[in-house]
Amino acid sequence: MTTLTQPQTTFAAAPVIDELTRLVTEHYVFPEVAEQIVTLLHRRLAEGAYQVDPAELGALVTADLQSVNQDGHLRLKHYPEVIPSEQGAATLAAMRRKFDDSMGGVPRIELLAGGVAVLEIAPAVFPLAWAAEPISAAFTLASRAEALILDLRGNLGGDPDTVAFVCGYLLDERTHLNTMLWREGDRREQSWSPVHVPGARFGGSKPLYVLTSGRTFSGGEELSYNLQQLGRAVIVGERTGGGAHPRESWTLHPHLEAHIPVGRSVNPVSGTNWEGTGVQPDVPCAADDALDRAHALAQARLAG
């Protein structure tokens, strides 16, 4: 009796690595680092290190990508579900699910003792077209407080336009916040807080504290860093993750998406950014203690 067996399909990593190295070469913000990355990935492929399934490949390649210059935005992300083929569609769909599950990215607004409000923006600063309404509503409520604690401990990044929009509620006039240097076309693009915001501003003079953790990343870091460099906020908590490079995404496989930084940030005050170093808190403490610490600082300042 003959037993028939189905042919086994083997995942081929080479096409994924070939396309990834092409994208890194063409788009990564630092061309000289891109050359090192491409050499490393080709060597690892030739050694047989990538003869694994897509999930493990994502983890292995991400570790190799980040080993060159510790760029936390540079990664090969694995999705258990099949993802769209359009550029950036998988990332956008995942963000939309998180937006819908988090009250539009503003999961908490609360008034504490002494007229101190807490406003949490998490898990991301979502695209402005989605987030403008919930952010405006939250800041309109918070505008009546005597002091504000902006909780970014769980903010993992997001849209620079939304960062500027949030800053508009915390400043009194249009302010230069950041300059993006893009690799493509060697372009410069300035980011400014808006002249007008819907609803009421909290304003640029009342006490403001920003809570951070080691998980705070990317857009959450830019918001913290902008306000710190302008002298507008006191940062309370932990040093942040250290990711200052805006990225784009490409689908390389039904379950794999490449995230590649295509620019870098330059703050107009410091002349640099928080890449690799993170945002250093003004009042260092454990993230779990940051809210109590900021509340005590706010109450003391208001009493004074």
Image (cartoon, grey):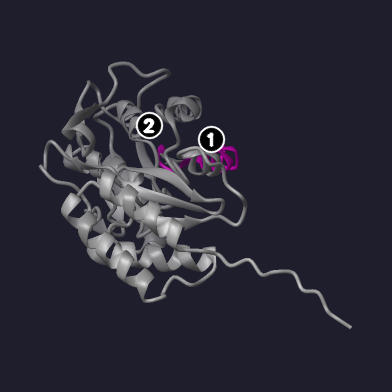
At horizontal 56% and vertical 51% (from top left) the residue drawn is: 254
Q: Can residue 90 be seen in this view?
A: yes
Q: In which quarter of the image is residue 194?
A: top left
In this view, the residue farthest toward the right is 1
At horizontal 38% and vertical 36% (from top left) the residue drawn is: 159
In percent of width and height, residue 82 lies at 61, 50
Amino acid type for the residue under numbered disc 2: Thr
At horizontal 44% and vertical 57% (from top left) the residue drawn is: 16
Q: Residues within 10 Å of mark 1 (few under 14, many from 20)?
A: many
Disc on res. 162: 2
Residue at the spot of label 1: 104
Magenta segment boundaries in residue numbering: 95-116
Q: Is residue 280 visible?
A: no
In percent of width and height, residue 251 lies at 48, 46
Task: Tell which circle, 1 or 2, labels the residue nearer the N-terminal end.
Answer: 1
Q: Is residue 102 magenta?
A: yes
Q: Do the residues under discs 1 and 2 have CB atoms within 8 angstroms?
A: no
In percent of width and height, residue 95 lies at 51, 41
In the foreground, 220 or 204: 220
Q: How crowded is mark 2: few (under 14 residues within 10 Å), some or many (20 or more)?
A: many
Q: Decide: is 274 above or below 165.
A: below
Quick one: quadrant of the N terminus?
bottom right
Q: Decide: is 3 above or below 61.
A: below
Q: In which quarter of the image is residue 38?
A: bottom left
